[in-house]
Image (cartoon, rainbow, N blue to C red):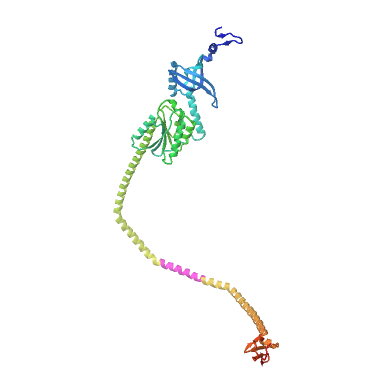
Amino acid sequence: MEGTTRQEGPTAYTLSAFSRFVAQAMSREPVLMGAWVVAEISDMAERGGHCYMTLIEKDASGTTVARMRANIWANRYLHIKNKFLYATQRELTNGMKVMFYGGANYHPNYGLSFNIGDIEPSFTMGDLERIRREILAALQREGILNRNRSLTFSDPPRKIAIISSATAAGYGDFMNQLQHNSAGVEFNTLLFPAIMQGDRTAQSVMAALDLVEQTSSIMPWDCVVIIRGGGATTDMNGFDDLNLARRVATFPIPVIVGIGHERDRCVLDEIACVRCKTPTAVAAWLSDTAGMAWQRVCDLTSRIASFATERLKGEHIRLQSIETMIPSLADARIRNARIRLQSLSALIPSAAREATSKEKIRLEGITTTLRMASRMRIQKEYPLLESMAESVRTAAISMLEKEKTRIDSLCRLTEVLSPTSTLKRGYSITRVNGKAVTDPKTVKPGDIIETQTAQGMITSKAETTD
């Protein structure tokens, strides 16, 4: 048999023969000839009018569970590309979940592949819409869906933080229209550059928002503008990000978005304080808001001026009327005052007599009351005074008797201790030259000694002392 190799042992096939068997087996399976397949696009590239990609399937954890090469040949690629773009306003790109129609093909040199012949755009639209709904539902559960939308602007917002690509045409159009606004309002703007397309869009915009918030203490921004001009609709995918949506929803400054064309929609359009269809529409909104604020100021100024003019006219007329009335009013006022003074003068004598009479009666009553009160107080205190006088008298007598007894005792003690009483008991006092002798050594032979006794004086002369 062609394609077989005879040798000892099992029958062996060449690789090409085995490949033909695989291709024949696949051709007998109808589902492999044509079926709708759901997968995610990866490694997409265009070469020579053809489109090459890898279709993958991931489980809930993000692990790839299936992988297959896929091709869209040039004779079908333009049709499929335009069909998808017209229906979704987006281009096919990596990471997009799609539904393709095609059949399996096995090539001896290139192996198994999936030849794509058609696409169902509504599936991708539904998947993108599902992602948006899931993000919005998550923000609703967290209670932050309408937080930024509920913020209020200063009137009008003039200090503007701009998040955009510095080289983007949309940013240039925005600045040109803002600087040449019909209201002639000057805006203070500062660009915070960010990547506005591709996988790094969400991360870059969030970093720019962080910088805006950090600088708000230096420049109190009235609002933040996130703008991006038109382009491939697939470039908008970066704005359908949960973390970016959460950051915008909770941002403490009002956010205005103008991303893409009028037909483009993203999650930020649903949560920002203001959504405009394009960057130039954002500039127009800011200019119109400033113009309306300026018009309100002009209207109020005109109304104030008109009101002040009318009020001054009225007050001038009123002053003129008052001026003519002043003389007659003054005369009438003087007459009324004179009549009142005359009435008061007539009343003063009688009023004085009546007041004097009342006060006299009151003073007499006070005098009587004081007299009676004094008498009652004296009568009340008299027994106490008598009791105190008796106590003083008794205490004085007792003190006198006590002192008399003490004096008598002192007198008796004085008599007992007196020299006379001592002499009566047989003692005597010896003196020399009028001084009492207490030491025999003070007496010298020949001294005249006087001895005092109770009955008289004895005079003697000392011969010797011992």
* In front of the other: 456 or 402: 456
Percent position (x, y) of residue 146? 47, 35
Q: Is residue 231 above or below residue 397?
A: above
Examine the rendered structure and indicate whether residue 97 appears above or below residue 146.
above
In the image, 23 versus 136, the foreground residue is: 23
As for residue 355 lying within the magenta part, the answer is: yes
Does residue 379 appear to the left or right of 289 in the view shown? Answer: right
> Magenta segment: does it hold 232?
no
- Our reading of the magenta stretch's main secondary structure is helix
Confirm whether residue 385 shows in the render: yes
Residue shown at the point (50%, 33%) measured from the top left? 140
The answer to which image quadrant residue 454 occupies is bottom right
Decide if residue 380 is on the left or right side of residue 461. left
What x and y, as percent, mark residue 291?
35, 36
Residue beneath the point at 45% across and 68% down: 359
Residue 151 placement (x, y as % from top left): 44, 37
* Range covered by the magenta-colored residues: 351-369
Quarter of image, res 345: bottom left
Q: Position of residue 174 (x, y in %)?
A: 37, 32
